Every structure is written in structure tokens, then in C-alpha cells.
Amino acid sequence: MTRSGYTFIAPLLLLMFAAFNAPLLYMLGMGFWSKGGGFTIEHYAALADAPVYLRVLAGTVRVSLVSTIANVALGYPLAYWMRGLGPKGQLVAVALVITPFWISVLVRTYAWIVVLGNAGVVNSSLLWLGVIDTPIAFLYNEVGVTIGMANVLLPFLVLPLFAAMLRIDNRLLQAAASLGAPPRTIFWKVFFPLTVPALGAGALMVFILSLGFYVTPAILGGNRVTMISNLLDKLINEIPRWEQASALSTLLLIFTFAVFALYRALDRRSAA
Amino acid sequence: MSGPGLSGPGLSGQGAWSRRLVAFVGIVALGFLVLPLLVVVPMSFSSAKALTFPPPGFSLRWYQTFFGDARWMEAMWVSTTVAALSSVLSLVLGGLAAYGLRRFAVRGQGAVEANFIAPLVVPAVIVAVALYLGFAKVGLLGTYLGLVLAHTVLAVPLVIMVLGVAIRSFDVRIEQVSWSLGASWFRTMRSVVLPNLAPSVFAAWIFAFISSFDEVIVTNFIAGAYETVPKRMFNELILEINPTITAVATLLIAFTMLALAAVAVMLHRAGRLKDTML
């Protein structure tokens, strides 16, 4: 064979370098470049000095953690329930999980304004039932943002988790049952431990995606919930401080890669 | 990723109480997932200006507003052409690269593949910041070309993943037979490889098209004066609640579901539905 693999790969590598790798490297460099020229860490020092950055960082991690926990609490039972369905039921359930996954995040986020607003579906139902006297404020605070994010991210947890649960051999569970283990023991001692790597990988994936969320906090949080992405938007588009945006992006990137490395390790174990 | 026991029974003899609880949470979670879609569609046919649910009456006024608005139509045109160009570009370059990665021993294969998947892992907002700064440096910021290139890069991981799986599962010996019978490389590609991979190529193209058509973050940063449908939606949503958006959203839902149904039918015929979806 005269052709080498790189004949096929080179065009895409070239494009990726020009429109992905080079801009990222340029951004990394800018975070360490001082106005007068030369290396500096002043932009990182500026990040540590301003309390607003720490506040936004803490808020981002808090919202991301709660969204991830909500995802696990809803996603695990859903995947487990789907595993026990018949073939037709599984097909319908998978279709219902995949369809929202492919529909614009904007559309799904927008719907929550209709559902959670003061005159929205939830509040008018609760008022009508007499559970509350005044509408509950779900929007333009962390509650709304968290609900919206959990909704957008749920398929990322459920799909791989369901796939991992399907790989578990039923004979293992039958063996445990034939040895006299009660259902609860079979679940906690046999089934659940086998799903832990996939659950961990899915949860980490959801967490990574939450950290960079932009659309949902901007729309459901109004100006009152600022996550890292929205702060980056301000640093680039409103008060141009490109060097600080570079420094902040670099930190987020490093953190993302660290969590991703953990994800890869767990994902390999769940596939094995 | 198919495994044994697709339709396997749940844990036999599990307590009825806990089984019911799992079913309840499962159904609630499914409802939670599809609730946004179930709310938006009826709202788009509402006759009222306020977002009240259920809608007080039926009307098509928000669709009329959308199709009668020159700015929305312009955004529609930009979105469609950018999605068409970037999806074809990512499909051609990504397809070639996936073929090279699967059919040859490539030095540094892991690193190359990781690089191609990276746009999916790196948070979109970081890609947006990097492209903003990089494109500003070379004069691509706010240009149509810059927009197409950015959308192409973002679609590459989807193409590589879908076609990578498909090429791996296509027996290399069939290609070797074609060569040994004297077919040129081009002929082998056109008459043997592509027809066999057609369903996956179609799926990859649709995924790339949807990813570009829905992209909002990077577009918002680098598009300058160009307006795509998601960019306009996003900026309107931040300012005010305009029911026209429900019509746009419903059209997007309908378009996405049709495209996904087409993909599902194609893959199902080729017997590859489960491998690609899970």
C-alpha cells in the first residue's frame, strides 16, 4: 500500500490546527502575556484578588453539583426502570430520552419560563389547588437555573447508564437469587456495584458540562445568577479584558481536563 | 455496544413496593424530560399575547409574525447555508480522517483522535473565547468564513464518532477483494465503501447539520453582524418574552424530530440503529 493514513487525516488536521488548536494556544499564551511584552502571571493574580471571581466560581460549582445530584437521583431509577421494560417499552423510552437530547438547548430552556413563571403551569396549578397563596419565584434565581440545567443534562447520564445496565448479565442476578439472596441484597451487593463505574462516569460528564453552561443560566437566571461562562461573556463582549478572560478560560480548561481524565478512567472500567 | 439480555426481566422477586417506587420515579423522570416539548408546541398556536397555559384559543398569528419578518427570514437563510456548508465540510474531512484512522496503522493515533474529539469535551464557552481572540487576530472575526469554519470544527467529533464505529464494523476484506479484482482506490470508495456506509454517512451528516443549526454560544461570540436563528432567539429571550419564539421553537422541534426519524429509519434498515444510538 503506497498510501499512508496521514494522506486521509492531513486535511482535517490542518483545519483543526487553524480553527481550534492555534486559537486555543493563542488564548493560553495571552493569559501569560503582559501589556509591555514578556511573561507575567499578573492576570492570574488579578483573578485571585477580585472577590467577584471567587463568588462566581463558588456559585458555578454549587449549581453544577446540585444539578449533578438531581441528575443521579432521577437518572438512576429511570435507567433501572428502563432495563426492566420489554423490548417495545425500551424502544419508546429510549426515543423519549434521545429526542430532547437533540432538540435545541434554547428551546428546552425557553419552555421552563412558561412552566415555572409566576403565571406558569406549576404556579397556577399550585394556586388552584390552594397549596400556596402567592406564586413561588422559580425563575431568575439558582432554583430555576438548576431545574433547567438538570433537564438539559439528564440524557447525558441516562443513555450511557442504561447501556451499561444492559450489559450486566442476568445470570449473575439469577445465581445470587438461587443462592438465597433476598432481592434487596442482590441489588445492593451485585447489581449496584456493577453499575458504579458507569454511574460515576455519567455523573462526572454531567458535572463537566454543567461547569461550562451558558445558555440556561443566562436565560433562566436573568442577571442574578452568574456562572463562569456568563462572566467570560462579560469580559469579552462588554468590558473588554481579554487577558483576564484568557486566564479564567485557562483555569476552567485545566479543571475540565482533570475531571475528564477521571471520567476516562471510570469509563474504561465500566466498558471492561 | 450491544449486550446480552436486552429484554431481560428485572430482578425477579424484587419487593413489589420498591418496584413500584422505581417505576414511579422513572415515569416522573421521563415526564420531566419531555415536559418542555409538550408545553412549547401548544403555546405556539395560542391566540394570546401573554404566555398563559393552556392557551385560551387557537391561532396561527405567531407563525405569520415569524414568516412575515424579514429579519427572521434572513436569520433562517444564514442558519441554513452555514449548516449546509459546515456539515458537508465536516463530513468530507471527518469521513476521510475516520477512514485513515481505522484502515491504517497511524503513528500517534490516540493523540490525533483525541484532538478530533476535543471540541466536544472542551466547554463551548472556552472554544468561543479562543476563537474570538484568535479570529480577531487574523481578521476572521465577524466573517461568514469564520462562522463556517467554527461550526465545522464543532461538528467534527460527531462525524468521527459515528463514522469511526461504522468503518470499524465494515469488513476490510470486502475492500481488499475489490482491489484484488483491479478496481482503483477511487472506484473502491465509490462502488464498495460508500454504498455500504451510506446509512451512517447520512446519520453523521444529519447530526452535523443539527449541531450547526442549533449552535448558539460560539456563534454569539464570533458572528458579528451575522444573525442565525438561535442567536436571534437567544438575544430576544434575554430582553423580553415574545411569543413568536414559541413558533420558532415548534418549527425547530418539528425539523429535528423529522431529521431524527429519517436517521432512525435509515439506520434501522441497515441494522445499525442500536450501535449508533447507545
Image (cartoon, helix red, strand yellow):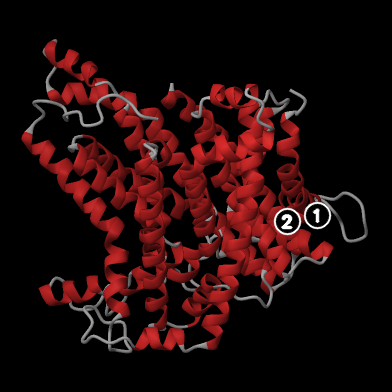
Q: Is residue A79 left or right of residue A209?
A: left
- Dot 2 falls on which chain? A
Image coordinates of residue A60 in percent, x first then y, are 51, 55
- Residue at image location 71% in from the left, 27% down from the top: B108
- Residue at image location 57% in from the left, 75% down from the top: B77
Q: Amino acid at mark 2?
A: Ser
Image coordinates of residue B46 in percent, x first then y, are 28, 84
Find disc 2 in the rendering and name its residue.
A246
Name the one closer to the observer, B255 or A179.
Answer: B255
Find disc 1 in the rendering and name its residue.
A30
Marks 2/1 same chain: yes
- Residue at image location 73% in from the left, 59% down from the top: A244
- Residue at image location 73% in from the left, 56% down from the top: A246
Q: Splitting the image into 4 quarters, where does residue B64 fall?
A: bottom left
Whether pointer 2 and pointer 1 mark residues with C-beta atoms closer than 8 Å, the reply is yes
Q: Amino acid at mark 1?
A: Met
